[in-house]
Image: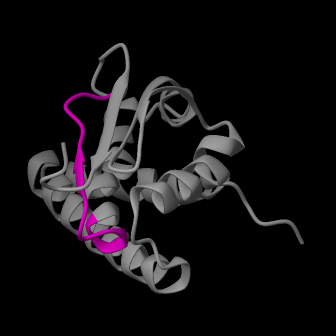
Amino acid sequence: MAELTLLERRRIEAGVLVPIIRAMQAEFGEQRVNAVVAATIRGIARSQGEAERERAQIATVEQLSARMTKGVLREGSLIVDVVGQSETRFGFNVTRCKFKEMYDEMGAGDLGFLLSCNRDFAMFEGLAPDMEFTRTQTRMEGADYCDFRYRVPGAE
């Protein structure tokens, strides 16, 4: 059986989570529920990053960029422009995000950041704790592009 793409996994998760989150928001309040969901998602993402680090042994920017270009970037869920790649840096801008499109189609555009983008920093902390990750904007939040930047601290 073929492995699901990340986009397919997020669609299945959202199909379950969105109705539960909506019901809990109605019962307990949006802010309170979103805070609990965000913290839970980040905890899961960090654990997934740690498990992936054990499996893939990501220790360099080159290994990280190879993992990403063979994974989520290759599957086409994110359309990107690579804006920098060296031994110490890897950066790309997401110009089309099919995750955003999916959440919008599901009527859950307001939950897209919470369920997907919210994972990125925690996942990366687990995956490559000796590297830095920055992102100042996302398509989910209305920006024209997401600016993903990875680097070795103190380099350049």
Q: Which residues are magenta?
A: 125-138
Q: Residue at x 61, y 58 (%)?
A: 9
Does the stretch in magenta take in 91?
Answer: no
Horizontal relation, residue 129 to residue 96: left or right: left
Q: Quadrant of the C terminus?
A: top left
Report the side of 54 relative to 77 (left or right).
left
- Who is closer to the viewer here, 95 or 35? 95
Q: Nearer the viewer, residue 86 or 117?
A: 86
Q: Residue at x 54, y 77 (%)?
A: 56
**Residue 108 seen in render:** yes
Residue 22 shows in the view: no
Which quadrant of the rendered structure holds the N terminus?
Answer: bottom right
Q: Residue at x 12, y 53 (%)?
A: 154
Q: Is residue 101 left or right of residue 114?
A: right
Looking at the image, residue 55 sits to the left or right of residue 89; the answer is right
Q: Is residue 47 above or below residue 41?
A: below
